[in-house]
Amino acid sequence: MSVIVSLITALVAFLITFRNTGLGGETHQNKVKAIAFLIGCLAAFSAIYQIIFRFLVVLPAGEVGVVETFGKVQEQPLNSGIHLISPLAKVTKFSTRLQDIKEPLQKKV
């Protein structure tokens, strides 16, 4: 959803920048165009960033990931590292590190 909002914001800002509209009057027209161009660039970079990182999953050392797409789980887990996945898939991370649990000794009476 945020990708769509970013793309619409970029489109509107670039339309304001490159069309000769009378926004802000003659004295402030260049400032309005500069601000609209800046907002358009920021929104476009935000949309590109979000699109790229929907396809990438980073699993740190000591974790594996299970990929679920539309309720169906893939048989092969994802090992540590960078992986390309479908933007519709959900990755659940699990720790594979050994956990040392210490319990105090209790005397039987």
Image (cartoon, helix red, strand yellow):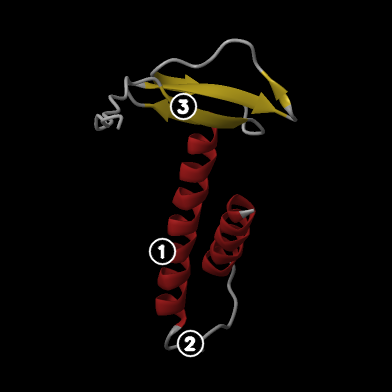
**Where is residue 12 shown, x and y percent of the image?**
61, 65
Q: Quadrant of residue 7?
A: bottom right
Is there a contact, CB below 8 Å, between mark 2 and mark 3? no
Q: Label 3's element? A: strand
Q: Quadrant of residue 68?
A: top right
Tag in front: 2 or 3: 3
Marks 1 and 3, how far apart in space?
41 Å
Q: Position of residue 39 (x, y in %)?
A: 45, 65
Q: Residue beneath label 3, please?
A: 94
Residue type, numbered disc 3:
Phe
Q: Earlier in the sequence, mark 1 or mark 3?
A: 1
Rendered residue at 54%/40% (across/down): 51
Label 2 crowding class (10 Å Cα cut-off): few <14, some 14-19, many 20+? few
Q: Is residue 52 left or right of residue 81?
A: right
* Residue at the spot of label 1: 38
Residue found at x 60% / y 77%: 21
- 90 above or below 47? above
Cα distance in 3D space between marks 1 and 2? 20 Å
Quadrant of the snapshot with the C terminus: top left
Q: Residue 44: give x, y in percent of width and height.
A: 50, 52
Sequence-earlier tag: 2 or 3: 2
Element type at mark 2: loop
Under tag 1, what secondary structure? helix
Give the residue displayed 48% in from the left and 87% down from the top. Answer: 26
Q: Earlier in the sequence, mark 1 or mark 2?
A: 2
Q: Which residue is mark 2?
A: 26
